[in-house]
Image (cartoon, rainbow, N blue to C red):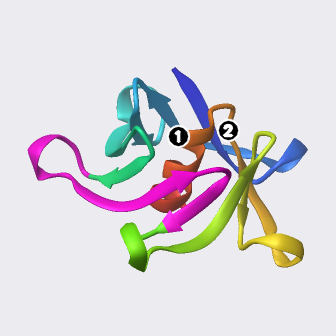
Amino acid sequence: MSSIYRGTGWGKTRVGECDNGRIYSGTGWGRTCVGEYERGSIYSGTGWGRTCIGEYENGCIYRGTGWGRTCIGEYVGGTVYEGTGWGRRSIGEYDYEGAGAAAFLLLF
């Protein structure tokens, strides 16, 4: 299990966890599963009722899927960014790429 943080550095706050591809809001016994990450796809919800809301590929976090998807953030070296290129802003930290991307869409 790994922690998901909002913010970076000393000011970061633990807001969730990832365990076997499942993304949780909150921590410990009070956590709630809000989605899943599986092979590049980001899902809201779990099991049969889940909905694909985005994708992660080559450092880019996409809202939507296929041709209609839009890159809305990036994951670089453990930091999750809102926006892309020079205008991007760091908003969180995570140590596993795909789940960090999923956390961006599901928790931030």
What count of labels does the image hold?
Answer: 2
Crowd band around label 1 with a 10 angstrom C-alpha radius: few (<14), some (14–19), many (20+): many
Q: Which residue is mark 2?
A: 94
Range shown magenta: 45-62
Looking at the rendered structure, the kind of residue marked 2 is Tyr
Which residue sits at x=52%, y=65%?
Answer: 62
Q: Position of residue 89 (x, y in %)?
A: 81, 69
Q: Is residue 105 magenta?
A: no
Check whether the beta carbons of the residues at disc 1 and disc 2 lie within 8 A of each other: yes
Compared with 101, 24 (above or below) is above
Q: Is residue 48 magenta?
A: yes
Crowd band around label 2 with a 10 angstrom C-alpha radius: few (<14), some (14–19), many (20+): many
- In the picture, the quarter occupied by the C terminus is bottom right
Q: Position of residue 73 (x, y in %)?
A: 66, 66
Q: Secondary structure at mark 1?
A: helix
Looking at the rendered structure, the kind of residue marked 1 is Ala
Q: Which residue is mark 1?
A: 99
Q: With 3 as the anchor, is 38 left or right in this view? A: left
Q: In this rendered view, identify the residue nearer to me: 47 or 32.
A: 47
Q: In this rendered view, identify the residue nearer to me: 66 or 55.
A: 66
